[in-house]
Amino acid sequence: MNLPRIFLLIAAGLLTSCVSTPETRINDNPAVYGGLSPAHKNLVSQGQIKEGMPKEAVYLAWGAPNAKSSGGHSGKSIERWRYLGHYPVWTDSHAFGHSYYSRSRYRGHYNYCPPTVQYITYTQAEVEFANGRVRSWERLR
């Protein structure tokens, strides 16, 4: 086997091992999945959640949250899980407003400045738990 092919196989293995899906989380946590009701198992395997589900089922369906917060409401302990998303914003300028082509101050010629990308973070979904079960949830479409 030649060297480039070995690197390709290693890279493919690393990329696939980093992807977390409901299926991989179920396979990694068979006891948790086995303890769910048939209705919750069906939802989890489709990556969906609903009110009344335990935290463990939400983890299997959606994965680990990016942030957790806790508080209270009407005498009950509340926990909120937040899932973040990122979308790219391509710009044709750098931080100081240079366009694709900027005139060099020293030689009088134009230099090519490639577009840059920045990622904007947004809240993709939130789940609120009361007594360890989903009280409410919200997800962008």
Image: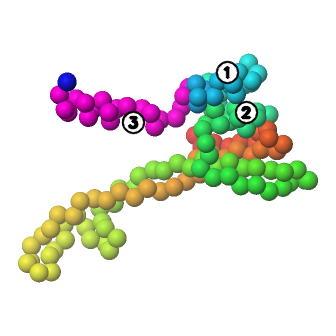
Which residue is under mark 1?
A: 42
Where does the N terminus fall, quadrant-wise?
top left
Q: Is residue 103 above or below residue 72?
A: below
Earlier-in-chain disc, 3 versus 2:
3
Q: Quadrant of residue 25?
A: top right
Residue 97, how many percent across, how many down?
31, 72
Given contact means CB atoms under 8 Å apart, are the residues at marks 3 and 2 in contact? Answer: no
Residue depicted at 59% across the width and 28% down the height: 28
Cα distance between the residues tagged 1 and 2: 11 Å
Q: Bounds of the magenta span?
A: 2-24
Q: Which amino acid lies under the numbered mark 2 shown in the image of this protein?
A: Lys
**Residue neighbourhood size for the residue with mark 2, other residues' Cα within 10 Å, grouped as few (<14), some (14–19), many (≥20):** some
Of mark 1 and mark 3, the one earlier in the sequence is: 3
The circle on residue 50 is 2
Q: Position of residue 114 (x, y in %)?
A: 23, 59
Q: Residue at x 21, y 64 (%)?
A: 113
Q: Of the residues under marks 1 and 2, which one precedes in the sequence? A: 1
Find disc 3 in the rendering and name its residue. Answer: 15
Where on the picture, by quarter, is residue 24?
top right
Q: Secondary structure at mark 1?
A: helix
The type of residue carrying mark 1 is Asn
| Quarter of the figure with residue 55 | top right
| Quadrant of the drawing holding the C terminus | top right
Residue 63 visible? The answer is yes
Vertical side of 23 occupied by 139: above or below: below
Contact, mark 1 vs mark 2 (Cβ under 8 Å) = no
Residue 117 % position (x, y): 35, 57
Between the residue at mark 1 and the residue at mark 3, the CA separation in whole angstroms equals: 27 Å
